[in-house]
Image (cartoon, rainbow, N blue to C red):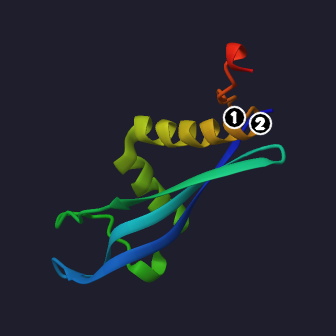
Amino acid sequence: MTTIYTWTVTAMSTLPEVEGKTEVVVLAQWLCAGADGETTADIGGNTQFTLSPDAPDYTPYANLTESQVLGWIFEALGENGVSNTEACVQGQINSILNPPVSPSNQPLPWAV
């Protein structure tokens, strides 16, 4: 099957005022969940932001959308960060579907 990834923002932290802007998001906590049929796994993280004083696209906190904040997160993580996060989730799913075999100690054949 193909793993379907879902990214969600789970929390945001703000500063009351930065460069004349109010309730400025400075940190977003997120969760990347993957589902491969009935098997699921997830990994969480957080991303810190710095508001540019020249930011023409400032959006008041009350008007933010999850899609917009996820865009900031993806931009901050970069393509490699997003793909590495999804690869970690896939690794967890793979380990659930095909658990690794661990070696076990055996009695010595000449000692029995």
Q: Residue at left 50%, top 36%? A: 83
Q: Which mark is residue 22?
A: none
* Disc 2: which residue: 97
Residue type, mark 1 in image: Asn
**Residue located farthest toward the top when viewing the structure as drawn:** 110
Q: Is residue 41 left or right of residue 58?
A: right
Asked if residue 67 is positioned above or below residue 78 in the image, the reply reads below
Q: Give the x, y percent position of residue 42.
A: 61, 52
Q: Is residue 94 left or right of residue 11?
A: right
Q: Is residue 2 left or right of residue 11?
A: right
Between 70 and 10, the residue placed more toward the observer is: 10
**Residue located farthest toward the right when viewing the structure as drawn:** 38
Q: Residue at left 83%, top 43%? A: 37
- Element assignment for label 1: helix
Q: Residue at left 41%, top 66%? A: 28
Per the model, the C-alpha gap separating discs 2 and 1 is: 5 Å
Q: Give the x, y percent position of residue 66.
A: 53, 66
Between 24 and 106, the residue placed more toward the observer is: 106
Badge 1 crowding class, 10 Å Cα cut-off, few under 14, some 14 to 19, many 20 or more, is: some
**Residue located farthest toward the front when viewing the structure as drawn:** 111
Task: State which quarter of the image contains the C terminus.
Answer: top right
